[in-house]
Structures are given as structure tokens and as C-alpha cells.
Image (cartoon, rainbow, N blue to C red):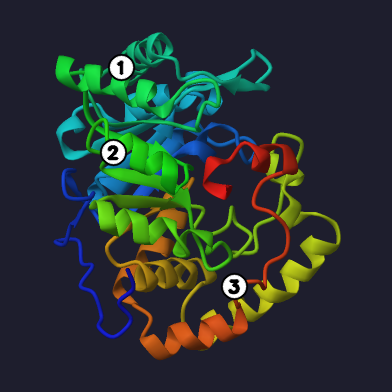
Amino acid sequence: MTNLDATMDRSPLRSTPLGKTGPSVFPVGLGCMAMSGAYGPAEEAESVATIRHAIERGITLIDTGDFYGNGHNELLIRRAIEGVRDKVQLSVKFGAMRGPDGAMLGIDTRPAAVKNFAAYSLQRLGVEVIDVYRPARLDPQVPIEDTVGAIADLVKAGFVRHIGLSEVGVETIRRATAVHPIVDLQIEYAIATRGPEASIFPALAELGMSATLYGVFSRGLLTGSKPSGKGDFRQYMPRFAGEQGAKNASVVEKLHAFAGERGMTPAQVALAWVLAKQPTLVPVVGARTRAQLDDALVALDKPLSASDVAALERIVPADAIGGARYPAQQMKILDSER
């Protein structure tokens, strides 16, 4: 759903519902993946301070995955939410298996595995219930009905409040909702990544589901950030490498100029574009520091007008950014891309 004709009030007093059956959350969520090494080393004390600062700013939805840093991220969040658990909703992804060296080993969403993953997440987070629990990817060996059914058992037992999905397509979404109400789909969306607009967003609206939108800065591409070293997985991302990387950098320069003309930073423009295009959905900002978070949240007070959005899309049309959003092997397993 798009609403470019009116300015949405996204002040700290406003909340956005996660679908027709989910909780209401602050209009922007905090994604914590980058705090556990995905983009290279992160400073733990600043990460904890950033999560707590986000909560002080009114952010309620905190997103993580049990495989982020092999459990490190959940332990980090545990420290950050101590004493303020009642002010946040925890969104947890599960199912991605990793080796001791961090290597990705596949996906496991069998019912027994679902309950096992949940048990460890509850322990690491130090909580009695997970607010939104979701498989990180579709397991090709396990019917989605079985996976959702296992999470539904956890809901009945009081260990999970709501069920979400991540990076799945319309057919899988429909099959999942036939088993249990689904509050939201987590999917990548940005001015550089508009695929969900074609069929996924209309299906969510039809089914009364929301979406939590990650990658709104395209992993820092739109803000001018570049891979920083061996531990930064962006060095393997097609959009950052070779000829595509050089081409994309020239597009990003134009976005930066657009932001400067309006007295905004690139992060603010990227987030404001998402808020303008999808006012009923919830973008998730992957800030690693308080300064990054504060910079991005200025977008709530500087909404883009319909004419601003049109001008920006002339500068960055849908096909402007070259390269797939993941390496080829990972793209093959994305149900959302089928």
C-alpha cells in the first residue's frame, strides 16, 4: 500500500500495528545483526548502549537471529533489555545452522528443531516468551505447514506470542496463514530493492499481514559505506564488487546530492523514502551506534512529499542499482525470489 498524497504522522507517540493480529510497534524497528560481526568488529559497550538508547527513543521492536554471531547477538540483547523487557517486542529468526567457524551449514526447520532453537533463544535472551518467532528461510525439506504448526505449539504453550515469516513468496505465505495467523513477513526493501511491490505487498494487504523491512540502506550502499575487511560479509555481495560496484557508486552519488539539497543525510533520505512508500509497514534500521540511530530517526520528522519521492525515483529508478542483493548461491534458496 502506498500513500504519497498525505504526510503520515510518525511521531514517537504514533504506533504501527503488525498486521491485524499482531502488536503495535514504534514505526521504525532496530535490527541488531551488525552488532555481532556481520560487517566486521563492533564495540560491545556501544552496541548495548545503542539498544538501550533506541528503547529510550521509543523504539519497541528489536530484531535478531539466534545465528547472529552464533548466539552472541541474543546475549548482547539480554544485557541491553535488562530491567526494560516490558518496553520491547523481541523478533527472533531461527533455523540457520552455523559451524564453529561461522560457516553457514544450511537450514533446519523440522518441528523438533524449531522447539530446540526456541529453548536456547529463551535462555540466551533471559526471557520467558518471544514476541515474534520466525524461520529465517524456507527449509526445502520441510513443509511450511509443519514449521508453522510447531511454532503454533509454542504459542499455545506460552513460549511465543506471535508468528512471523522471513524471505518467502506468496504461495508459502498463503500456506502458512492457513495454519495459524501470521503477523508479518520480514523482507528486504529499499529504493534499491523494490521487488516486493509487485506481488508480495499486495498479498500481505489482502491477508491482513504486515512486513518488517530490512536493508533499507542496502547494507550501507546507499549511505556510502564500503566493506571494511575480512570479517565484513559485504565483500561477497555483488552490489559492492567490480563493475557493478563502480556503477552503483555513481548512482549513490546522485542520491547523496539529492539529500544535500534538502538538508538531509543519505540515511535519512533512504529511510524517509521507505516510510513514504509503505506507511503501514515497519522499516528496520541496522544501526550499530547511537549516532547512526539518531541520524536515521530524523527521517521521522522530515517526511518526503509526493514530489520529493517522484524526483528521487527519477534519480534512482527501480533498475538503477546493479547486482543481486545476495551472492548467487544464496539467491537460489530464496523462496521470495521465485
Discs 1, 2 touching: Cβ within 8 Å: no
Distance (Cα) linking label 3 and label 1: 40 Å
User: Circle 1 is placed at which residue position?
Assistant: 122
Q: Pinpoint residue 209: horizontal percent, then vertical percent.
A: 27, 50
Residue 2 visible, this orientation: yes
Residue 286 visible, this orientation: no
User: Circle 2 is placed at which residue position?
Assistant: 177
Compare marks 1 and 2 and give the one earlier in the sequence: 1
Question: On screen, 24 above or below 306?
Answer: above
Distance (Cα) linking label 1 and label 2: 25 Å
Q: How crowded is the residue under tag 3: few (<14 C-alpha within 10 Å), some, or many (20+)?
A: some
Q: Amino acid at mark 2?
A: Thr
Q: Which image quarter: residue 80?
A: top left
Q: How crowded is the residue under tag 1: few (<14 C-alpha within 10 Å), some, or many (20+)?
A: some
Question: On screen, 37 above or below 264?
Answer: above
Q: Which image quarter: residue 93?
A: top left
SS at badge 2: helix
SS at badge 3: loop
Residue sitting at the far right:
243
Q: How crowded is the residue under tag 2: few (<14 C-alpha within 10 Å), some, or many (20+)?
A: some
Which residue does the image show at 38% across and 42% down from the upper left? 173
In which quadrant is the N terminus drawn? bottom left
SS at badge 1: helix
